[in-house]
Amino acid sequence: MKMNQVGKSDITVSALTLGCMSLGTDRKKAESIIDRSLDMGVNHLDTADLYNFGLNEEIVGEAIKPKRGDIILTTKVGNHFNKEKKDWFWDPSEKHIKNGIKDSLKRLQTDYIDLYLLHGGTIEDNIDESIHAFEDLKKEGLIRAYGISSIRPNVIREYVRKSNIDAVMMQYSLLDRRPEEELLDLLHANSISVLARGPLAKGMLSNESQTIIENKGKNGFLNYSYQELKEVNEQIKNIKADSFNELSLKYVLKHPGLATAVFGASSIEQAEENLKGDFKKPLDNKIYVQLQQITKPNKYDQHR
């Protein structure tokens, strides 16, 4: 597995990351998915305090406890939630961020977080206050690096301008090429790494694409109609040299600003399907251009 540096930090992550949101609540099953992913070259796990209202962090923490030193761990903060009522509200305040990490460290059974992300963000937030909180946590040694998980260009630009973030997590796939328009080059120029979530577009860019498009694509996806999804799917199948999963993951990893592609897995088989490709070898330039010609260069019209 290829390893990539995260921003200007001393953190290196595997080109593929296991996104833990889809692990479910069966602890043994979740641990088996994590262990298999680690065996196949993954060193980076991504979770968040909001996933299952803290339970996901607990499950991940228990699974990785014996091997914590070998793992790069990302979690997120910013959603002030009530586990009993199962509701939450947005809270990027310094107080909540500093309280949030205490709770996350306890659930994850660790004394530090490698990469701590603000789980969202709007232009109306007190961004300076949020940055101050993350910088304090870094000075205290509770986190090694920080960043944001956002698809809002205006918010991302503010963090680029004001902060020392090392990473931005954002939705990016062959069907969602919005980051290419105004974010990837900006972040790369500022030595900020991109963590791409949703690289398989809910499975519509996977080996099970046809079935999933029939089930999930009836109402379209972003600016693709159902018919367009089917047409794009057929065209990609005609050119792919690797498995559909591998092709889709390698597409987002092609840009030099990408550190890792974050995939979800609810079974060992799904994890293996994503990890069995050769990710030391980049996507062929000719195929990369073909894929761009087949798909749309969408733009951020909302989420400004």
Image (tube, grey):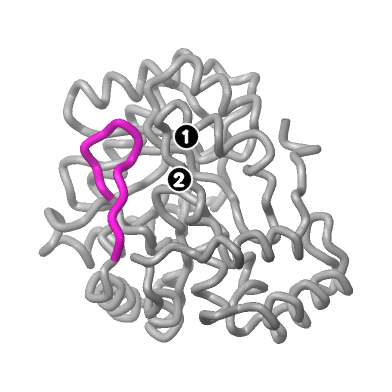
Dot 1: element: helix
Q: Give the residue displayed 13% in from the left and 62% down from the top.
A: 67
Is residue 289 visible to us here? yes
Reading the image, the residue beneath label 1 is 188
Displayed quadrant of residue 58: bottom left
Q: Identify whether 294 is placed above or below 83.
A: below
Instruction: Tell whether label 1 touches label 2 (CB within 8 Å).
Output: yes
Above or below: residue 273 compared with residue 146? below
Q: Residue 176, which numbered label?
A: none
**Range drawn in magenta:** 1-12
Residue 256 badge: 2
- The question of residue 147 being in magenta is answered with no
Q: Residues within 10 Å of mark 2 (few under 14, many from 20)?
A: few
How many marks the image carries: the answer is 2
Where residue 259 appears, x then y in whole percent? 39, 48
Give the mark, 2 or 1, whose residue is nearer the N terminus: 1
The answer to whether residue 80 shows anywhere in this view is: no
Picture coordinates of residue 130, whole percent (x, y): 44, 21
Please state if 54 lies on the left or on the right of 178 as rendered: left
Residue 280, above or below 148: below
Image location of residue 91, percent across then percent down:
52, 29
- Front one among 173 and 134: 173
Residue farthest along the front direction in this orientation? 286
Residue at the spot 66% in from the left edge and 78% down from the top edge? 239
User: Residue 215 appears at what percent x and percent y?
Assistant: 75, 80
